[in-house]
Image (cartoon, rainbow, N blue to C red):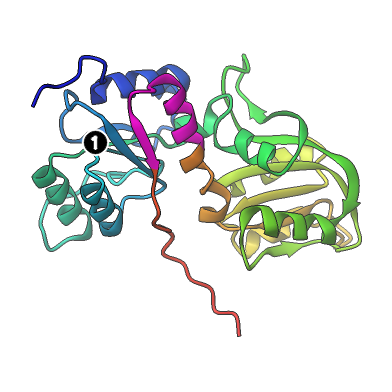
Amino acid sequence: MVVSESLPRARDIAAKLESWAKLSFAESYDNVGLHVGSANRVVSRALVALDLTPDVVDEAVQIEASMILTHHPLLFRAPPRILDSDFIGQLILRLARENITLYSIHTNLDAAHGGVSIALADILGLGDISFLRPDSDNSSGMGAIGQLSRPQTLDAFMEHLRIKLNTPVLRYTGSTDTQVSTVAVCGGSGGSLIEAALEAGADVYVTGDLSYHGFFEVLGSDGDCRMALVDAGHYETEQHTENLLCSWLTQRFPSVDFCRTKVCTSPIQYYIP
């Protein structure tokens, strides 16, 4: 088979992504970049998913993708062994057998301009969007904050949120008749930014993975809420990352078919009687 000279290699796609979401933006605990396979793999089709699961690998094989890009790293921590009896091990071995290169772009994409949280704020229709917690020179940051086009009750905002994120469940604290106009968001696990949202004057902060005790952080000395807090789910607040990456990469590599996975990779299900 003759390989088209116009097709990029995995390393080219990685370099382009890292010119946007620099590796230095990633949190110290994170593990991002090329994780499995060859950097020299020629890429004509790539599959984009939030997580790597067996179903995602099956889909990649079926559509003949030579590269998979995920937001969450499979190799978040170094595995002590690579065995086909382990969840991570069998995925790595399967990728190697199928000659599929795996790349992950995680907290560096969270922190980039136009990244996960900025895109989430845009999906919710916010205006005047900026980083919730910018770094010293505003070259990167975490979370996002913006304004609704007009004030609305928390109840109406949560219905808007439920529809936009296609989620059946929202966990929240605050009075449903409170008027909200300034909205802070963070895709994924954003409990560490609650204080930043309070200091920024947000009326409501939307994120995922909030703990029981996290909801107490917005209570004042009188027990009243200083800011409404909504847990919309980790997957639900980051699922748009798949479209974000597909769109961004397609503009820069028009010869490559970037496909969003058809698999819902969230392991969480909801029981709604």
Horizontal side, residue 87 vs residue 258: left or right: left
State whether residue 150 is above or below residue 171.
Answer: above
Q: Secondary structure at mark 1?
A: strand
**Does 249 appear in magenta?**
yes
- Which residue is rendered at x = 40% and y = 23% of the image? 17
In terms of image quadrants, where is residue 24? top left
Residue at left 21%, top 14%?
5
Which residue is disc 1 drawn over? Answer: 35
Residue 177, image x, y percentages: 91, 62
In the image, taking residue 184 as reference, residue 61 lies left or right, namely left
Towards the viewer: 1 or 190: 1
Q: Position of residue 127 (x, y in %)?
A: 78, 32
Q: Is residue 152 left or right of residue 229?
A: right
Does 49 sit above or below residue 107?
below
Q: Which residues are magenta?
A: 244-259
- Comparing 261 with 119, the one in front is 261
Amino acid on which disc 1 is placed: His
- Residue 65 placed where, x, y %? 24, 40
190 relative position to 127: left or right: left
| Residue 194 against residue 54 in the figure, above or below | above
Q: Residue furthest bottom?
A: 273
